[in-house]
Image (cartoon, helix red, strand yellow):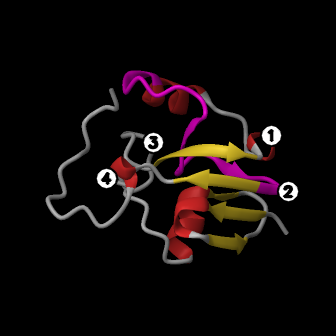
Amino acid sequence: MPKLMFRDKKVTVEIAPGVSILDAALEHGVGLYHTCGGNCSCSTCCVVVLKGAENLSAMEPPEAEILDSFDLKPPYRLGCQAQVMGGEVEVEIPLRSREPRPNKTPPAPID
């Protein structure tokens, strides 16, 4: 079974192949903000892929467009779109994507 490590949370989980980073986070109680509900229409669930990018699903054009519109370049991926296909993946959740967000306003793009 694939393994997904959330470095900043010090949590490693085993998941079925094809599970998105966002779904794994939600299932295992790891706070990952997702304003659009995981529908690839915002950037709030972005993660930084530290290791194992080759074990993720390929980036599709809608994800690339969202990341580009917020000036987010690799190693960023959207948690709602990046699926762990096998092996081991290590990610970090940037401050802008961590829950809880008390004011619930979308984060500003990263400078």
Q: Which residue was labeled with disc 3?
A: 40
- Does the residue at mark 1 contact the one at mark 2 (Cβ under 8 Å)? yes
Task: Count residues near mark 2 (Cα–Cα under 10 Å), then give few for <14, some for 14-19, many for 20+.
Answer: some
Query: Where, by quadrant of the figure, is residue 107 drawn?
Result: top left
Amino acid type, label 4: Thr
- Does the residue at mark 4 contact the one at mark 2 (Cβ under 8 Å)? no
Query: Where is residue 76 drawn, in percent x and y?
Result: 55, 36
The single residue placed furthest to the left in the displayed view is: 103
Which contiguous range is marked in magenta?
Answer: 68-88
Q: Which residue was labeled with disc 1?
A: 54
Q: Which residue was labeled with disc 4?
A: 35
Q: How far apart are marks 4 and 1 (CA)?
A: 27 Å
Task: Count residues near mark 1 (Cα–Cα under 10 Å), then give few for <14, some for 14-19, many for 20+.
Answer: few
Nearest to N terminus: mark 3 or mark 4: 4
As helix, strand or loop, the secondary structure at mark 3 comes to loop
- Does the residue at mark 4 contact the one at mark 1 (Cβ under 8 Å)? no
Nearest to N terminus: mark 1 or mark 3: 3
> Quarter holding the N terminus?
bottom right
- Above/below status of 37 relative to 3: above
Q: How far apart are marks 3 and 4 (CA)?
A: 10 Å
**Residue at the image point whose x is 56% and y is 40% from the top:** 77
Q: Residue 87 carries which label?
A: 2
Q: How far apart are marks 1 and 2 (CA)?
A: 9 Å
Residue 87, magenta (yes or no): yes
**In front of the other: label 4 or label 1?**
1
Amino acid type, label 2: Gly
**Residue at the image point whose x is 60% and y is 60% from the top:** 7
Nearest to N terminus: mark 1 or mark 2: 1
- Does the residue at mark 3 contact the one at mark 4 (Cβ under 8 Å)? no
